[in-house]
Amino acid sequence: MVEVKILTTPIDVLYCINAVMSPHTGGIDVFVGTVRNATKGNAVVRLEFEAYERMALAEMQKIANEAMTRWQLNAIVIHHRTGTLVVGDVPVVIAVAAPHRAAAFEACRYAIDTLKQTVPIWKKEVYEDGAEWVAAHP
């Protein structure tokens, strides 16, 4: 099972976890990205995410399909949010289920790292004293 979504509403973390559960699963790894209150010494007020949605969904599907094949997963869910998010909000959730935990860990890390490098979703960090568009990856 593969599910990828771009949402304008809050991501339901428990839904993502429940969606990948099955009797064939030995391990579930979940990455929950959250908006932190500071970046490089700047107090963050909010983040604004924009996406080229059609292409972003296609890239997310490609990542999910690659992970399913490479690690022989049972399921993967990738949800990303767009719009304005404040400190504590969740912009991304990746839930991966596999027969064994090592595959779940590896596939989840692959999915978030690749998403940040290849998916056309852009982030603007708004600070107390300005704003800037930032690279998707560190």
Image (cartoon, rainbow, N blue to C red):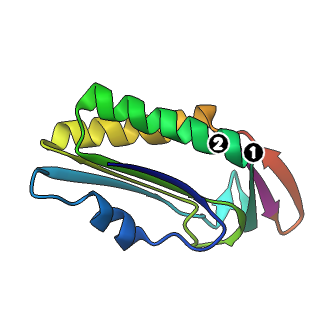
Q: Is residue 61 left or right of residue 21?
A: right
Asked where in the image residue 30 lies, by quadrant, the reply is bottom left
| 34 or 63: nearer the viewer | 63
Q: Is residue 122 visible?
A: yes
Asked where in the image residue 56 lies, by quadrant, the reply is top right
Q: Residue at x 84, y 69 (%)?
A: 128
Mark 2 Cα-neighbour bin, 10 Å: few <14, some 14–19, many ≥20? many
The x and y percentages for residue 130 are: 90, 60
User: Could you tell me the amino acid type at mark 2?
Assistant: Ala
| 78 or 30: nearer the viewer | 78
SS of the residue under disc 2 = helix
Q: Which residue is mark 1?
A: 52
The question of residue 95 being in magenta is answered with no
The x and y percentages for residue 138 are: 62, 37
Q: Is residue 44 visible?
A: no
Asked where in the image residue 58 lies, by quadrant, the reply is top right
Q: Residue at x 33, y 37 (%)?
A: 107
Above or below — where is 11 with respect to 133? below
| 80 or 133: nearer the viewer | 80
- How many labels sit on residues? 2
Point out the stretch of residues depicted in magenta: 120-126
Q: Residue at x 64, y 67 (%)?
A: 37
Point out which mark residue 39 bears: none
The question of residue 122 being in magenta is answered with yes
The x and y percentages for residue 134 are: 76, 44
Q: Which residue is mark 2?
A: 56
| 13 or 3: nearer the viewer | 3
SS of the residue under disc 1 = loop
CA–CA distance in space, label 2 to label 1: 6 Å
| Labels 2 & 1 near each other (Cβ < 8 A) | yes
